[in-house]
Amino acid sequence: MKKNKIEAVFIDRDGTIGGTDEVLYPGTFELFAYTHEALNRLKKEGIKLFGFTNQPGISKGEATEESFRNEMIDFGFDGVYICPHQHNEGCNCRKPNPGMLYKAAEENKLDLTRSIVIGDRWSDIVAGHNAGCMKVLVLTGAGQDALNKYRHKWSNTEVDYIARDFEDAVNYIINFVSNIEEEKAIR
C-alpha cells in the first residue's frame, strides 16, 4: 500500500456513482458500468473510501438506513455516513452541512485537509468546502445543474476539478497522487 497525502475520498451516491439525479432506493439503484473498477483503483492507492449521502426517505419510512449502508458497503466502501433527515429538520449532518465529514474524521482519525469530496450536487461541494476538503464535481446526475443553475449557491468556493464522470474523477485523483509521489522523489 502506497503512502500518500490523500487519506480518504468521500463519495456521494445518487448521480455520482450510479443512478440519476433522483433518489433510487436500495434494490433499484444501479452503479455506472465503470464504478467498481474505479473504486478498486482508489483502494489500490491506499485511500480509504467513504460514502456520504443525504437520504431523507429514511425519515419518511420509505427505506432503512441499514439497507443503504449495506448496499454501499457491498459496493466496496470502507464506511458509510448517511443523513436520514428532511431538509427542514435542522440537523448538522445534512449536506451542505459538514457534519458527516466531521463524524467520519473523528471516527477514523482523518485529516480532512488531506481528503477529497466527489459529488454531483452543489451541497456536496459546499460540505467539502466547509470541512476543508478538496472538491471534485462530476457532471453526471445533477452535476450540470450544480455548475450552471445552482452556481450561486456555492459561489464562495471553487472546485479543484470538474470531472466528466466518476471514472474521470478517479483518474484525476490518481494523477494527483502520482504527482505528489514524483515531487517527493525529486526532493
Image (cartoon, rainbow, N blue to C red):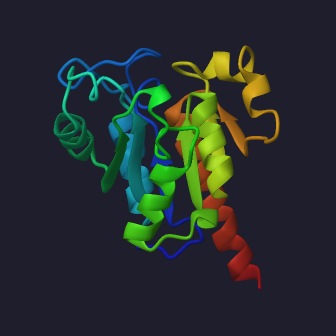
Q: Quadrant of residue 114?
A: bottom right
Judged left or right of residue 170, residue 73 is: left
Q: Considering only vertical position in the picture, is 74 above or below 148?
A: below
Judged left or right of residue 23, residue 26 is: left
For image coordinates 23% across by 38% down, the residue present is 65
For image coordinates 46% across by 37% down, the residue present is 12
Image spot of residue 93 (x, y percent): 46, 45
Image quarter (top left, top right, bottom left or bottom right) of the N terminus: bottom left
For image coordinates 47% across by 65% down, the residue present is 105
Image quarter (top left, top right, bottom left or bottom right) of the C terminus: bottom right
Image spot of residue 63 (x, y percent): 20, 25
Query: Is any part of residue 45 visible from this angle?
Result: no
* Of 74 and 93, the residue lying toward us: 93
Q: Quadrant of residue 89?
A: top left
Q: Which residue sits furthest right?
A: 156
Q: Which residue sits furthest bottom?
A: 187
Image spot of residue 71 (x, y percent): 21, 37
Q: How many dots with numbers?
A: 0
Query: Is any part of residue 19 visible from this angle?
Result: yes
Q: Quadrant of residue 151?
A: top right
Q: Considering only vertical position in the picture, is 46 above or below 160?
A: below
Q: Considering only vertical position in the picture, is 104 above or below 58?
A: below
Image spot of residue 117 (x, y percent): 56, 47
For image coordinates 53% across by 44% down, the residue present is 170
